[in-house]
Amino acid sequence: MKKTFKILGIIALVVAIGFSMTACSDGSSTTSYPQPKQFIDVTGIPSAYNGMIGALRLKYPDTDKIIVYSTEEKISENSTTFPLFNWNDEKPWEGSGNFSITIIIFRNSTDAAAGTYIYAGVIGANTNIYGTTTTLPWS
């Protein structure tokens, strides 16, 4: 049952990321979208994941409710900076608090769109998020 909820949560994350990506401008429109205000910089990502795609989800410790998510970002030089968005309204997140942070890694954007990930794991079990950019080492 726990595995089912985990899989459903990952699928929901991928769907939300997909919706946020379709809302992004391709440069042909004059519509401006709110820019992210807070970021998590993940460092020390194993080199085996370089060139792949990563995404984050943040939830309060000991709950299954996702509060914040990141867009899918390319992993480069063993680190990536992830912009943070509200799970409920997809607007840039401007908050703080202690969160459990899960990273999901996909081979490429096609796998990300399909929800086919190669790794999902908690990289911060009780991480204090505050300020504009929080640096989090892979653990």
Image (cartoon, rainbow, N blue to C red):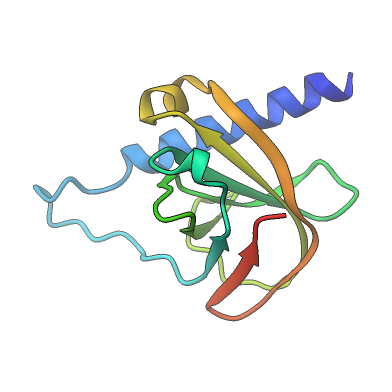
Q: Residue 72: x, y in percent?
A: 44, 43
In the visual, does 38 lie left or right of 10?
left
Instruction: Please state, as top left, top right, bottom left or bottom right, where the N terminus lies in the image.
Output: top right
Q: Residue 136: x, y in percent?
A: 64, 65
Instruction: Please state, as top left, top right, bottom left or bottom right, where the C terminus lies in the image.
Output: bottom right
Q: Residue furthest left?
A: 28
Query: Would you identify the image quadrant in which residue 113 lies?
Result: top left
Compare residues 78 and 106 and report the one nearer the observer: 78
Taking the spot 82% from the left edge, 22% from the top edge, the residue there is: 3
In the visual, does 26 lie left or right of 122?
left
Work out whether 34 lies above or below 96. Answer: above
Q: Residue 69: x, y in percent?
A: 58, 50
Taking the spot 70% from the left edge, 24% from the top edge, the residue there is: 8
Q: Residue furthest front?
A: 47
Work out whether 123 lies above or below 54. Answer: below
Query: Would you identify the image quadrant in which residue 19 lies?
Result: top left
Disc tally is 0
Taking the spot 87% from the left edge, 25% from the top edge, the residue there is: 2
Taking the spot 50% from the left edge, 31% from the top edge, the residue there is: 106
Q: Residue 133: x, y in percent?
A: 54, 75
Query: Would you identify the image quadrant in which residue 77 lies?
Result: bottom left
Work out whether 121 lies above or below 119. Answer: below
In the visual, does 127 lie left or right of 117?
right
